[in-house]
Amino acid sequence: MLELEEVKEKRKQKGQEEKSLSERDRRIRRDVDQALQDAGSYEEFLENLSSMGYELRGRKHLSVREPGAGRARRLDQLGEEYTEERLRQRFGRLPIPEMTGEEIPIEWTYVFIPYRERHLTRYQKERFLRRYRQGKPMADSKTWKYRVAIHELKKLQEEFDFLAAYRIQDKAQLKAISDATKEQLWENSRARKQLRKEMVPYEEMLLLLNKLQEKQMEAELYQEGYQEFFQDHQTYQNLLGQLKEMGYSLSEAEQTDAYFFEKEERLRIERKKILKEKRIAERLREKAEEKENLEAQQKEKNRETSARGRRKGG
């Protein structure tokens, strides 16, 4: 019962928090949640927000400004789950603390942190180097030993598939694809805004459906004989009555919700694919430019060597 009470309390707090937010804030939170869902790191999350048309501001506190909006909105004012610390935690990482320079006399222990792309903190790297130079292998190293190599192989496979799919011959093609993805992201953002406009007449009904879904489990438990959920059952029935007064049955509301969810999901998947191709194209461009620079430096070095040889021979 304790766990159930905790769940109910969290739901209550979340509901109160939602009520205190303006429609603009709820819209920003939905976009932030979607940008997080499509990202593999905090940096990709910021890039996703930018691709949605948001202007990012602030160093100490991240703020976003919607296209055409007069003022920016601080994310940490949208709820406790939207502080930078909590946002980073969704990727399993916290901001790296400053090193004090003090030696901490503890034995090394490897802590498994389950998230998509784990990285050693600066402290972990320094501890590892210290033990490595002392000839002491790091405990439980099998879990991360090949991570970098596997990650690089995955990137190489992505790049190979990309080059083969688009038959890339030169850097100009990569730039053309990168430019095209920017246009595609703009079109995707425009389609999302159009979908939001389409949803406006249904917002009250969808908000009511969301409240119904939050109480559905308790209402079903009451139907099964759990009398402690009587109040929740009554709330559920009242919400059903409100939905009926709006002219919708529960099945009609669920169909409407599914319709918008499907359209949102298609746009989300499309944007995720575009962002991936954009990253690969830009990564390949950077590699090509780096190679060109190295070749140019080598040619210059060879010319200087040849010139010195001629002067000595003369």
Image (cartoon, helix red, strand yellow):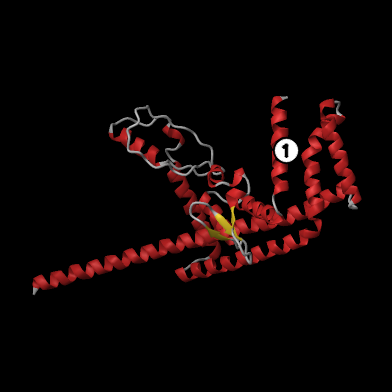
Task: Give 216 or 84, whichever is nearer the viewer.
Answer: 84
Percent coordinates x, y for residue 221 in the rendering: 82, 30
In the image, what residue occupies the spot 44% across and 38% down?
Answer: 144
Task: Give 221 or 77, whichever is nearer the viewer.
Answer: 77
Quarter of the figure with the N terminus: top right
Q: Is residue 235 above or below residue 78?
A: above
Visible residue check, residue 33: yes
Say left or right for 216 vs 196: right
Res 23 → quadrant: bottom right
Percent coordinates x, y for residue 184 in the rendering: 61, 66
Task: Give 158 or 70, whichever is nearer the viewer.
Answer: 70
Visible residue check, residue 226: no
**Amino acid at circle 1:** Lys
Percent coordinates x, y for residue 195 in the rendering: 73, 61
Task: Give 307 or 259, whichever is nearer the viewer.
Answer: 259
Q: Residues within 10 Å of mark 1 (few under 14, many from 20)?
A: few
Q: Is residue 86 above or below residue 224?
A: below
Say left or right for 248 vs 310: right
In the image, what residue occupies the spot 87% across and 41% down?
Answer: 238
Quarter of the figure with the C terminus: bottom left
Q: What secondary structure is found at the residue carrying circle 1?
A: helix
Q: Is residue 298 above or below residue 146?
A: below
Q: Is residue 275 above or below residue 97?
A: below
Percent coordinates x, y for residue 248 in the rendering: 89, 51
Q: Which residue is mark 1?
A: 12
